[in-house]
Image (cartoon, rainbow, N blue to C red):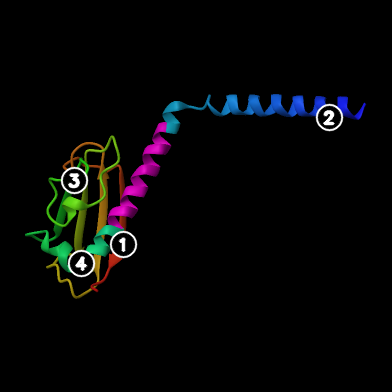
Amino acid sequence: MALTLIVVVVLLTGRVTISTLALVGRGNADFQRAARARSEAAEWIQAVTEYARKVGLAQSAGACTGTPCRIVIPAGDPPAGAPPPFNQAPALPRGFGCGRLTLTDWDGPGGVDPSTLRLLTVELFTGTCTDPQPFLTAHTGVAAR
């Protein structure tokens, strides 16, 4: 009797598990793609921000010629069209056209001085970096080493 009861419980548990797994795959595919793209975009923004901090603010500012300092990171692995040292930055996630880093004064316009606190804005675009609206944007403060 106990063996029969155990077999019934195991079979019912297995059936519930299989039904649950089947339901997981029936989600809204568009919603899942959008959530995955947002997650990958946030991961890239975090990675490129850490990369900018790793190479140093002075080197990052040296990659630009004007102010505010703008660095465009094109698609590709590695992003060969970006200025050094960002030609070795983390590659853009698949489906994104370009990323852009903007280094400015914390309090507004002015020259990029690597000896003070600066605002780093990282944007990720699905098309080109000239699109009016980025897919995702993040801001952080960076200081000289």
Which amino acid, mark 2?
Ile
Residue tagged 3: 79
Name the residue furthest right: 1
Above-or-below relation of 4 to 127: above
Q: Residue 144: x percent and y percent?
A: 23, 73
Q: Earlier in the sequence, mark 4 or mark 3?
A: 4
* Residue drawn 17% across the image and 71% down it: 114
How busy is the neighbourhood of tag 3: few (under 14 within 10 Å), some, or many (20 plus)? some
How far apart are the two marked residues, 2 and 3, measured between alpha carbons? 58 Å
Number of the label disc, if any, that sits on residue 140: 1
| Front-most of residues 137 and 65 | 65
How busy is the neighbourhood of tag 2: few (under 14 within 10 Å), some, or many (20 plus)? few
Kindly report which numbered mark, 2 or 3, lies closer to the viewer in this rendering.
2
Disc 2 element = helix
Kindly report which numbered mark, 4 or 3, lies closer to the viewer in this rendering.
3
Residue tagged 2: 6
Residue tagged 4: 57
Disc 1 element = strand
Q: Residue 62: x percent and y percent?
A: 11, 63
Q: Earlier in the sequence, mark 2 or mark 1?
A: 2
